[in-house]
Image: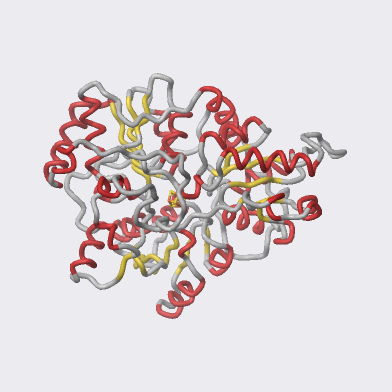
Amino acid sequence: MTTTDTPVTAATASSAPTASVDLTLRDISSGAASGSSCSTELLDAPWDVDARDPGYGPGASMADPIPAASPRQGEIPQEYRDASTEELDRRIRAAKAELGDRAVVLGHFYQRDEVIQYADYVGDSFQLATAAKARTDAEAIIFCGVHFMAETADLLSGPEQAVILPNLAAGCSMADMADIDQVEECWEQLMEVYGGEVPGDDGRLPVIPVTYMNSSADIKGFVGRHGGIVCTSSNASTVLEWAFERGQRVLFFPDQHLGRNTAKAMGISLDEMPMWNPRRPLGGNDEQALHDAKVVLWHGFCSVHKRFTTAQIDKARAEHPGVRVIVHPECPMPVVDAADEAGSTDYIRKAIEGATEPTTFAIGTEINLVQRLAAQHPQHTIFCLDPVVCPCSTMYRIHPGYLAWALESLLDGEVINQISVSQDVADPARLALERMLAAKPAPVGAAPERATSERTTSER
Ligand code: 13P
Ligand code: SF4
């Protein structure tokens, strides 16, 4: 498999962060800083959260219902719960030095800075999976991100490499919204409506399943088995073009917003995008609506990006004339429409890095990335559109204590919290990823009509 992008490499920082979301939360709580957070429980130790009733934990997804089968994290050994920040820092650096190239630590853009400081690579989910693939010398890949990312790293890495998720409770509420049984049931119903997987007169299948990278390996495997493909937030329109060459329609999951925003930018009307609610017969649609559909949108969403509103954009424009508003395409359509640009986490990073004049940026994505970009680019004014500090609940479950535990266990010859995808799922899931890597943007002039707008959506 070839890769299309280069991972971002981070030099391991030598000292603890001096500005981070964790420190902001502490300052808000003590009164040293103004502002508010979405939960006072964000200051609780993650192992205390792990011991509570099943749930996503404090942060943006805290009100989302968690599926009963979601992995849970048992209590980590007492020594990691008792260790001070300084002791964990010393132990993590010592373990990393002793392990050398045997272990690689990956940090997603949305991780807290207190974890990012130890990452060998920092990037978006796909960049990190390709970094894992490139590091064939590493026996262990410690993925400081969420469950579907670790699964993707396992799909792309070698059979001898172990992928470790430091806290098994670091899932993703959006990925959990497309459960494999519900998706199989949806497919059965659609096949009854469309008369099976039989090509029409134009040679195209009635429907091609497309899944966002933010989905379980089971879903990627389903897509691979049914002629479908994976997409990221950076290549979604290229992937939809690929799918429309092969199918009359697309079934897009789990994120309705990425699906809607991408299809709308390709000129597809909202009437041609019915939503599939897995709890209702025919997803809550009549047969005619499913026949008329171009894109059937799964009823999933990201609770981090659902927090952004057009009122926040109006306020930013009123208070900062000339502000450049960039949001992630997981935001609801009115927010993407009101922004100047929409793009993936890497698009946002590159847009800021590419600004040659001091600029004010209002950003609609996860707060850890926004605050880090603000600290890295003091020549610009960079702020999060959401005034309430509300990190991704599941990214937040990773903490230096779990990283120390994973690294020191490796030194003791033990692999903890290994994420491995079974062979029957891995083969078709890899096929769906390979199709994504091979999909190329349509040549200029051949692309379907786009909505007239100055907005851009990034393409990898
Ligand atoms: P990336 O694919 O840009 O890493 O985003 C992952 C994510 O979880 C966005 O909400
Ligand atoms: Fe999942 Fe949203 Fe968190 Fe990304 S930000 S990991 S989509 S819950």
**Quadrant of the rendered structure where residue 142 is?**
top left
Which residue sits at x=40%, y=58%?
A: 60
Which residue sits at x=44%, y=29%?
A: 154
User: Left or right of 333: which side holds 312?
Assistant: left
User: Left or right of 229: which side holds 246?
Assistant: right
**Quadrant of the rendered structure where residue 101 is?**
top left
User: Farthest residue toward the right?
Assistant: 201
Residue 179 image position (x, y, % from top left): 55, 42
Residue 244 image position (x, y, % from top left): 72, 44
Which residue sits at x=28%, y=58%?
A: 41
Q: Which of 88 and 4 is in front in this view?
A: 88
How many numbered marks have been drawn onto this rendered protein structure?
Answer: 0
Residue 457 image position (x, y, % from top left): 56, 56
Q: Which of 333 and 280 is in front in this view?
A: 280
Q: Which of 179 and 6 is in front in this view?
A: 179
Q: Nearer the viewer, residue 448 or 119?
A: 119
Residue 94 image position (x, y, % from top left): 15, 33
User: Left or right of 388: which side holds 442?
Assistant: right
